[in-house]
Image (spheres, rainbow, N blue to C red):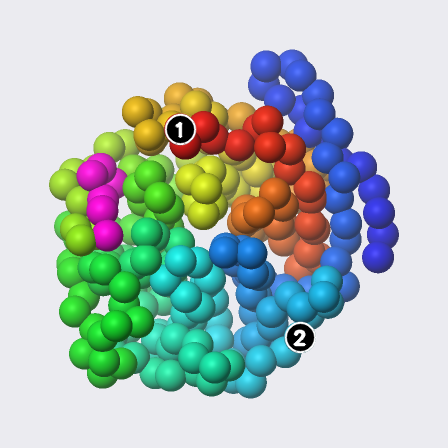
Amino acid sequence: MLRFICLFLLYAGAIAELPCTVMPGKLKQLDAGNGEVYGVADDETIYFLHSNQWAQIEGRLTHVTVGPAGVWGVNKDNYIYRLKNYNWIEVSGLLKQIDAGGDIFISGANADDDIYCVNQDPNTFPANSLPYVHIEGKLKHYACGPLGCWGINSDNEIYYRNHVTPSSCKGTAWSKVEGSLIMVEVGTDGSVFGVNSEGSVYKRDGISPKNPRGTSWTQIDVFNSFKYVSYDAGFLWLISDNGRIFKCEYPESMLPNLL
């Protein structure tokens, strides 16, 4: 593995040095949550991180997620699966993108950019009858965390869903957030990161329980172009345009204040 230092140039002018590692292999999408990391490759093979190496899991998926609600994924036909004892169990519904980062609930978008979620712990429901809740609006990417949910529409506009709770994953209303991103991910701790159409990575600043939408975006300059970002347990995970995987240590001082 190649060890190097990424210089992060912040809008405020401060420069921090983050130690990063180029991981073996290539992926097209990954998700980090609850101390675990899962990903899928271009050929739809599925992997999870074990002892700092990628271990393959049986099956084929185009998108995978891990979080408080467990490990879930969707395949090229938009069928939905959840992982139980390292076996994929098909569940009801159709989604192109799914997220397990909510407060023990799942959410996602289907092929028509319609948005859905499942209240409470979806693992307690029968696989063939998940009680999906439809959320008004259209999004191509929807991700949730302990302080709410974030989404990106087909025009790369950013939205925050207000008053989302485990018993009411639908929330109450949308708030448009300044900026433009192609995808957004929410960490288990509430931190929010995204990537724009030019491959630049951004972090949302000022997030707290009193201000869950935060205050502004800070660009993270890692001298590369990226297509995916995820964060968990002190590490920022990035996938470059050519599929290379970067694991960067992220200082606690830069995490959101959830107190």
Q: Quadrant of the C terminus?
A: top left
Q: Residues within 10 Å of mark 1 (few under 14, many from 20)?
A: few
Magenta highlight: main SS:
loop
Residue 180 position, x and y percent, is: 42, 35
Residue 192: x and y in percent read: 45, 38
Q: Does residue 31 show up?
A: yes
* Amino acid type, residue under disc 1 in the picture: Leu
Residue numbers of the magenta segment: 161-166
Secondary structure category for the residue under label 2: strand
Q: Is residue 34 magenta?
A: no
> Circle 1 sits on which residue?
259
Tell me which amino acid carries mark 2.
Ala
Q: Is residue 58 above or below residue 12?
A: below
Residue drawn at 47 percent across, 30 percent down: 256
User: Compared with residue 145, is residue 87 higher up or lower down, i.e. above or below?
Assistant: below
Q: Nearer the viewer, mark 2 or mark 1?
A: 1
**Which residue is the extreme one toward the top?**
13
* Residue highlighted by disc 2: 55
**Label 2 – label 1 distance at C-alpha:** 36 Å
Q: Quadrant of residue 108?
A: bottom left
Q: Residue at x 29, y 38 (%)?
A: 160
Disc marking residue 79 = none
Res. 108 in view: no
Graded by Cα atoms within 10 Å as few (under 14), some (14 to 19) or many (20 or more), the crowding at tag 2 reads few
Residue appearing at x 32%, y 57% in the figure: 104
Residue 164 counted in the magenta span: yes
Q: Residue at x 60, y 32 (%)?
A: 252
| Left or right, 36 with reference to 165 | right
The answer to whether marks 2 and 1 mark residues whose Cβ atoms lie closer than 8 Å is no
The N terminus is located in which quarter?
bottom right
Relative placement, left or right, of 6 versus 237 is: right
